[in-house]
Image (cartoon, grey):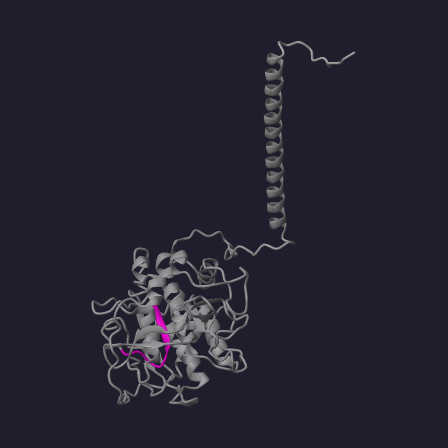
Amino acid sequence: MRRVVAAAAVIAVTLVVPSPARAAVICQRSEAPAPVAAGVPAEDQVYAPKRLAGFATGRGVRVAVIDSGVDAAHPQLRGHVTPGADFLHGDDNGRQDCNGHGTAVASIIGAMPARNTGFQGLAPGVAILPLRISEQEVIDGKAVGDKGTPAQFAQAIDLAVDQGADVINISLVMTSDNAAVRAAVARAIGAGVVVVAAAGNDALKGNPDPFPAKYPGVIGVGAVQFDGTVATYSQRGDYVDLVAIGNDVTAAAAGGTGHSVRSGTSFAAPFVAATAALILQRFPQLSPGEVRQRLIATTDPAPGGSVSAEYGFGLLNPYRALTETLGPRQQARPAPAAMTGDDPAAAALAARRAESQDRALLFAAVVAGIVLLLALTAIIVRQGRRRGWHPATSQTSD
């Protein structure tokens, strides 16, 4: 039913998408194929996708990846990537990725297990919808490569809804508001689609407002390191709903069978998008707002136990998100606060300890008194027996 509503909302926009031209776009690669990652990456040890599989795999859920395309030939993605679209070249096929960014994002979401590596996605049962809108990357501090316009960005969001996306992952950031993109995001959420977006990597470069992460209803994601501390580059603001591991993350590499190591909020966001897909399989009746609520209510609390610009509501916990029973408006449980002299709980605890100490001292005094009394009694009895129980008299001389 929501697809009918969505189609009515986006038809005017999707009609202006350039007609597929089947452009002959071939990625030119000069680098050697990336090596296959051995062992289980640290983030997979933390999020434990095999443990999650007992509850959900994302089967039946479609996740749109609005990015640089997805290499559908990678063995851990093969058969799980739909055609999508290429807005950079007017093509109806987004299953190609020249810089590997979108492939990495898609693999964190939905890479299937493989015998030669311990790496896999959190939701290996999902279908990936690749919408190619930018292949721009930063090399030596300079942006290199093509990127679409904000209008095309909005069209990609609308097309994701039109092609049945349940979740949209956007690991791209605009540094200025755009009415067309804002409206497209609102249409997607209104159509029942969960929208997840990276918070951006410019915390040390002025921390500009990131869009679409800042738009209402979007789940904004910051990045943490493996020790749980916020990455220095991860942007701070009220647009951060929660954080996920985003530093030195293993992901599939485009153009081969191997893997690469990536860092950025771009690679924290797909962990949240994957968890949203798992939630939707397990609880298909939930709205985007309810999915967001479940995500933030089941986070592991950040230091201090309260909402912050750095951590949002806390650290992503996919297992809790799939297994906990929530009240209608339950928030994340706060971490235990550090006790101070002004803390009522600390004062009560100190009073109880003082009372216990007083009782212990009183008990010790009573016992000591009894022992002393018994000792005196023993002395008196011994002296009495020695004197034959006659009263003691003083000896005087005339």
Prevailing SS of the magenta stretch? strand
Residue 62's image quarter?
bottom left
Asked whether 94 or 102 is in front, the reply is 102
Residue 250 horizontal side relative to residue 143, left or right: left
Verify whether residue 32 appears in magenta. no
Which residue is at a point 69% across and 13% down the rendered structure image?
A: 392
Left or right of residue 30: residue 278: right
Q: Is residue 152 visible?
A: yes
Q: Is residue 332 above or below residue 185?
A: above
Q: Vertically, is 214 above or below 283? A: below
Is 70 within the magenta? yes
Q: Is residue 31 above or below residue 356?
A: below
Residue 29 at x, y percent in the picture = 26, 88
- Quarter holding the C terminus is top right
Residue name at image x 30 percent, y 82 percent: 97
Residue found 59% across the figure and 36% down from its top: 360
72, 183: nearer the viewer: 72
Where's residue 246, x and y in %? 41, 72
Where is residue 391? Give x, y as percent: 69, 11
Percent x, y of residue 159? 38, 76
Is residue 130 visible in this depiction of the protein? Answer: no
Quadrant of the rendered image containing residue 381: top right
Q: In the displayed image of the protein, which residue is found farthest to the left? A: 115
Front one among 120 and 384: 384
- Which quarter of the rendering shows the N terminus? bottom left
Q: Which residues are magenta?
A: 62-71
